[in-house]
């Protein structure tokens, strides 16, 4: 059932998100969504796509959870059993094909759920007027405003003396710090963060959406210039 979701359902949801993105910003949104959708299909890694809407559009994540449960139930009823070593992507599907029970049935079932995911996601986004892609509102945004934002994040992170390293993935700012116990989640929320994750005392991950990499780069530039 997870193959159905990761190879077909989530990529279809990504397409629904794309079609609900204003046309002026579809080029940037399309590049991001194509990347995370292909990652989900090929490897079964869904986090980059799910984090695009988990915090900014919770109803869509609830829909995703319900459809995942439905996909698992239908696969069970059809006696489809296909395990995976890493995650339920195309690579694992090929590797475990000979060990699976009725693996070919996953393909038409996947196409059916792709349609279900697309239609339900498309109209959920449209009817609830969900804004998901955190795209730049203008290509003319000035570097000074970007630097101001990065400087604000540096202050929220305890200043440059508290920062050990800066990195980012598609949706999260990943910071290594000397101590994160004194940092306030409210400070990050005020800067537009959708969530804050603290794996340990010296690591903090700030969910920013698609601007995470840009913010990380600006933080690096400011720190390297001092």
Image (cartoon, rainbow, N blue to C red):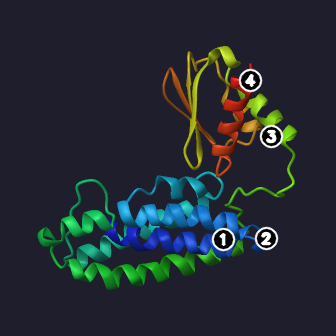
Q: What residue is drawn where x is 55% and y is 52%?
A: 51
Q: Could you say which disc has been placed on residue 225 in the image?
A: 4
Secondary structure of residue under mark 4: loop
In the rendered structure, which disc, 2 or 4, sits on the residue that comes first in sequence?
2
Q: Residue 104, image x and y in percent? A: 23, 82
Label 1 or label 3, whichever comes before in sequence order: 1
Depicted 107 relative to depicted 154: above or below: below
Q: Which residue is mark 3?
A: 146
Q: Position of residue 192 (x, y in %)?
A: 74, 42
What's the CA distance linking mark 2 and mark 1?
18 Å
Please report the residue visible at 59 percent of the width from the left and 56 percent of the height from the top: 52
In the drawing, does residue 145 fall left or right of residue 35?
right
Mark-to-mark CA distance, 2 and 4: 35 Å
Number of the label disc, if any, that sits on residue 24: 2
Q: Element at badge 3?
A: helix
Q: Residue furthest front?
A: 225
Question: How many numbered dots are placed on residues in this image?
Answer: 4
Residue 45 x/y as whole percent: 41, 56
Task: Using the image, determine if residue 136 lies above or below residue 14.
Answer: above
Q: Nearer the viewer, mark 4 or mark 1?
A: 4
């Amino acid at each position: 059932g997870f193959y159905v979701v990761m190879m077909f359902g989530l990529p279809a949801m990504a397409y629904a998100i794309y079609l609900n993105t204003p046309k002026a910003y579809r080029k940037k949104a399309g590049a991001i969504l194509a990347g995370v959708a292909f990652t989900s299909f090929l490897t079964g890694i869904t986090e980059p796509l799910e984090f695009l809407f988990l915090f900014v559009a919770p109803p869509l994540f609830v829909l995703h959870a319900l459809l995942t449960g439905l996909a698992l139930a239908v696969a069970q009823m059809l006696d489809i059993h296909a395990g995976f070593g890493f995650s339920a992507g195309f690579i694992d599907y090929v590797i475990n094909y000979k060990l699976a029970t009725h693996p070919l049935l996953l393909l038409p079932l996947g196409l059916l759920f792709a349609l279900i995911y697309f239609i339900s996601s498309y109209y959920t986004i449209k009817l609830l007027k969900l804004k998901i892609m955190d795209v730049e509102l203008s290509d003319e945004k000035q570097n000074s405003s970007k630097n101001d934002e990065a400087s604000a994040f540096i202050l929220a992170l305890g200043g440059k003396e508290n920062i050990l390293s800066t990195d980012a993935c598609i949706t999260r700012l990943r910071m290594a710090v000397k101590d994160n116990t004194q940092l306030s989640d409210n400070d990050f929320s005020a800067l537009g963060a959708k969530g804050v994750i603290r794996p340990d005392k010296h690591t903090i991950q700030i969910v920013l959406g698609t601007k995470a990499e840009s913010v990380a780069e600006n933080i690096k530039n400011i720190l390297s210039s001092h």
